[in-house]
Every structure is written in C-alpha cells, then in structure tokens.
Image (cartoon, rainbow, N blue to C red):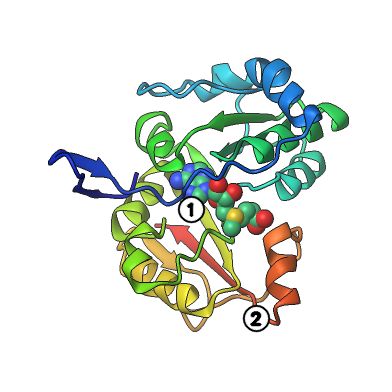
Amino acid sequence: MIADAPGGDGRRQPIRSYVLRGGRITNAQRRALDELLPRRGLPFAPALLDLDAVYGRSAPRVMEIGFGNGATLIELAASRPGTDFLGVEVHPPGIGQLLLGIEARGLANVRVIAHDAVEVLRHQIPPASLDEVLLYFPDPWPKKRHHKRRIVQAAFAALVASRLRPGGTLRLATDWEPYAEWMLEVLNAEPALLNAAANRRWIERPPGRGSTRFEARGQRLGHRVFDLEYRRL
Ligand SMILES: C[S@@+](CC[C@H](N)C(=O)[O-])C[C@H]1O[C@@H](n2cnc3c(N)ncnc32)[C@H](O)[C@@H]1O
C-alpha cells in the first residue's frame, strides 16, 4: 500500500505497487505453497514480529522486497549463513519457486511473507531492526498516470529508513533510467538516508549482487542498469 486514493464506491482504496497476475504455476510450485509455506512462511498480521524468536537467534537481518523467483535471495542466503533473510513477495509462482530453492539448498536462514511489502514494513517490522533492505528491479510503471503506483515514494523512503538500524543499508537497482532518476529524487530528499555514492547518484555494480531475471531481461533489451545505495543516518 503506497497511499490512499478514492475508490469507485466513494471509500478510499490503497494504491498498490503491483497487480496480481494469474500466471502459470507449476505443480512443484503449488506443492511448495501448500506444504512449505506453512513451515517457512510467516503469516501477515498487523502486529510487530519478534525477529529473534522467528529465527531462533540474534543475527544481522536482511529483507528483500519483491524477490521475483527468489534466485538472488537463495544465493545470498546460501553464501551468508550467519545472516537472516526475510523475503516478501505477492506473486504465488515466485513464492513457490523461492520455497523450492530453500528446500533444495536446506537453508535455515530464510523466511517468507506472502503479502504487500509496504504493509509488512509498516505493521510487522520493528523500528531500527533491519541491517539491509533490498529492492531490485521494482516494477517501473513507466506511464505517467501510473507513477503513483511506483513503490519508491516519499512515504516509502521514510518507512524503510525507520525500519533500518542506524548505519543500515538500502540497496536498489533498476534498468529503467527514468525510474532511476525518480529514485534519486525521492530518496535523496529523505533526511534519514544518505546516498552512498561520492556524486550522490549511482554506485558501481556491487560485486555481491547476484544477477536477477529482470536484470537479464533488461540487458537483453539493451538497457543500462543503475545501482543505488543509501545509508541510514
Ligand atoms: C519486476 S519484478 C522484479 C523481481 C526480482 N526482484 C528480479 O529482479 O527478478 C518486481 C516484483 O516485485 C513484486 N512486488 C511489487 N510490489 C510489491 C509489494 N508491494 N510487495 C511485495 N512484492 C511486490 C512483484 O510481484 C514482482 O514479482
């Protein structure tokens, strides 16, 4: 949920940063949703999570918003067993795919919430509890009339900043140049976030960021990829 807009019935409806696509779901993804989500997922509820209790330890915490099919999250979690990861996504086939990866790699440090990440941040994530927030290739909503659907908005910037620990990091990437400029404008204006680039614009591609499906798609289309990094002050 990004902001409120008038609904057709006169009541105010939330503007979402996604439209739930039907999409094909494989039998394996469906099984993963049925059998693994109850074990690896956390239900959405408007109550703060006790993250130490969720993971059974106190460790650095990383949240990925809109993980797609989860390839980046799986690689990160496998390479950093001392860090806890929370993936939040709304697309069922992608959630199923991530769960299959968690099972195949035997990852104990990943949990999933199948819900709008903005609501999860607002209601479930305690203030100053995250070390990193990852937002890779969010839907660019290129048409001007859809810009209000972009997840990166001033309220979102303030919300993410409030959930990061001081010194924590927000990492973003996009292959849509107008959205990269939009991100800069919105995030550079958030007083609790500092753009980590020397020129307050892009950083070099971080070596630790795995390639994502949407990055590969952008590259096939000849798009340049923009990486941004912000520190919580
Ligand atoms: C363009 S895809 C990128 C997926 C992945 N990060 C990648 O790079 O391959 C954007 C994803 O964000 C998800 N998404 C958009 N808004 C979201 C929200 N508010 N909460 C959770 N997921 C969201 C969509 O379902 C979609 O899977």
Q: Quadrant of the N terminus?
A: top left
Amino acid type indicated by mark 2: Arg
Which sits in the foreground, 165 or 46? 46
What secondary structure is found at the residue carrying circle 1? strand
| Residue density around tag 2, few if under 14, some if 14–19, many if 20 or more, within 10 Å | few
Looking at the rendering, in which quadrant would you find the C terminus? Answer: bottom left
> Which residue is depicted at the point 76% across and 65% down?
207
49 is higher (above) or lower (below) than 222: above
* Residue 91 position by quadrant: top right
Visible residue check, residue 66: no
Q: Nearer the viewer, residue 29 or 211?
A: 29
Q: Is mark 2 within 8 Å of ligand 1?
A: no
User: Where residue 162 sits: x, y (%)?
Assistant: 36, 45
Horizontally, is 144 left or right of 87 in the view?
A: left
Q: Residues within 10 Å of mark 1 (few under 14, many from 20)?
A: some
Residue behind mark 1: 167
- The residue located at (54%, 31%) in the rendering is 114
Task: Give the side of residue 174 with respect to residue 69, left or right.
Answer: left
Left or right, 44 with respect to 192, comes to: right
Image position, residue 206 (x, y; %): 69, 67
What's under tag 1, amino acid-wise? Gly
Pointer 2 residue: 224
Look at the numbered disc 2 and give the secondary structure of its residue.
Answer: loop
Q: Residue at x 81, y 44 (%)?
A: 79
